[in-house]
């Protein structure tokens, strides 16, 4: 029996754990994969206050240790659902059922896929969703990055220092990521911008050999690449709670700035909540708010 069970050990979940432990609550964090969430894939965080440069892995490790040192229990199990019939909640994993006074859902989001027929089969054979994890395999090779947000821009910048050539393919004529990063990309001689274009085919034998790219004017080209990095955003990981918790049209958990869901005593924190700005600082902010609200709930 825990006073607060937190689902997800990313920045939002671990921050919630720090706040809940500092309020002396018995806290369990359940994590399906590894601690840190998507931030571990960021090579260099430059926009976190008071940290001019820190790697995502170092940031996540510091946060994890801080939560652990404050007495948070962290168990690596995938949550498959939550049940509630009164004030008491049950958080269900494949192996266990954890009783909780309150629950904070901080499950973040997963990679959006292009949806091409052989995309899944080619993961690890040329297709990747994480440049900082897999970029080193493409030293002096040709790669493409798809997407126009900050992730795609930063991935292209990172890969430009490893690969021989980087194609940055985006379906619009302008990027939505930061202008300063676009300017840095323009300064790289081995980056080719392929705008107003969509990747429509992944051609492979044992591994990826080339991609078909169709321009919005109808022009088709084949680009020889060894690797394709898909960076087209993320989708919230809320499926396990959809029978109980109200989601918006695109799958985010509906909640205001106080992080209350439609179910009393269940809160949401981080990228899987409806909000305008999804950043590291807003994720940790949610973690703090959700924990404070959960503490109030269990104290009543
Ligand atoms: P994002 O901002 O949602 O951008 C997704 C990009 O993928 C957009 O350019 C979108 O194009 C494109 N896209 C979406 N679906 C597509 C499809 N099916 N085919 C082709 N292109 C598609 O995602 P993100 O770049 O992962 O960033 C997520 C959040 O994290 C953002 O708030 C971002 O600012 C933040 N972030 C911050 C940092 C940092 O501060 N250092 C680093 C990384 C990410 P359209 O514009 O046409 O929809």
Image: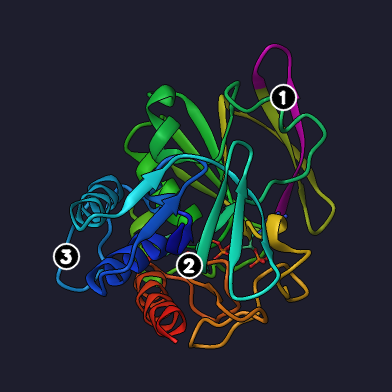
Q: Magenta span has 55?
A: no
Q: Residue at x 59, y 75 (%)?
A: 87
In this view, the mark in front (2 or 1):
1
| Mark 2–mark 3 CB contact (< 8 Å) | no
Residue under label 3 = 51
Counting from the top left corner in percent of width and height, residue 78 is at 57, 43
Q: Quadrant of the C terminus?
A: bottom left
Residue under label 2 = 177
In this view, the residue in front, 289 or 244, is 244
Residue under label 1 = 121
Circle 3: element type:
loop
Is residue 267 toward the left or the right of residue 85 in the image? left
Counting from the top left corner in percent of width and height, residue 151 is at 47, 56
Circle 2: element type:
loop
Mark 3 Cα-neighbour bin, 10 Å: few <14, some 14–19, many ≥20: few
In this view, the residue in front, 35 or 96, is 96
Mark 1 Cα-neighbour bin, 10 Å: few <14, some 14–19, many ≥20: few
Is residue 273 toward the left or the right of residue 166 in the image? right
């Amino acid at each position: 029996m825990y006073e607060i069970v937190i689902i997800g050990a990313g920045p939002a979940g671990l921050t919630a754990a720090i706040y809940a432990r500092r309020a002396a609550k018995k806290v369990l964090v359940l994590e399906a994969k590894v601690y840190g969430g998507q931030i571990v894939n960021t090579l260099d965080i430059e926009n976190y206050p008071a940290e001019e440069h820190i790697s995502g892995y170092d940031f996540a490790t510091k946060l994890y240790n801080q939560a652990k040192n404050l007495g948070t229990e962290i168990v690596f199990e995938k949550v498959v659902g939550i049940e509630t019939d009164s004030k008491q909640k049950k958080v269900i994993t494949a192996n266990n059922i954890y009783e909780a006074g309150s629950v904070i859902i901080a499950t973040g989001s997963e990679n959006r896929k292009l949806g091409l027929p052989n995309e899944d089969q080619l993961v690890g054979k040329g297709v990747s969703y994480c440049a900082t994890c897999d970029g080193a395999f493409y030293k002096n090779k040709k790669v493409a990055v798809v997407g126009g947000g900050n992730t795609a821009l930063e991935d292209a910048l990172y890969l430009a220092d490893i690969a021989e050539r980087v194609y940055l393919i985006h379906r619009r004529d302008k990027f939505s990521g930061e202008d300063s990063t676009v300017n840095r990309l323009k300064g790289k001689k081995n980056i080719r911008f392929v705008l107003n274009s969509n990747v429509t085919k992944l051609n492979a034998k044992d591994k990826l050999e080339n991609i078909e790219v169709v321009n919005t004017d109808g022009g088709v080209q084949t680009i020889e690449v060894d690797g394709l990095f898909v960076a087209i955003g993320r989708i919230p990981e809320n499926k396990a709670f959809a029978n109980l918790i109200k989601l918006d049209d695109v799958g985010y958990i509906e909640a205001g700035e106080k992080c209350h869901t439609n179910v009393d005593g269940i809160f949401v924190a981080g990228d899987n909540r409806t909000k305008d700005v999804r950043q590291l600082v807003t994720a940790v902010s949610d973690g703090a708010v959700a924990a404070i609200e959960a503490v109030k709930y269990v104290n009543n």
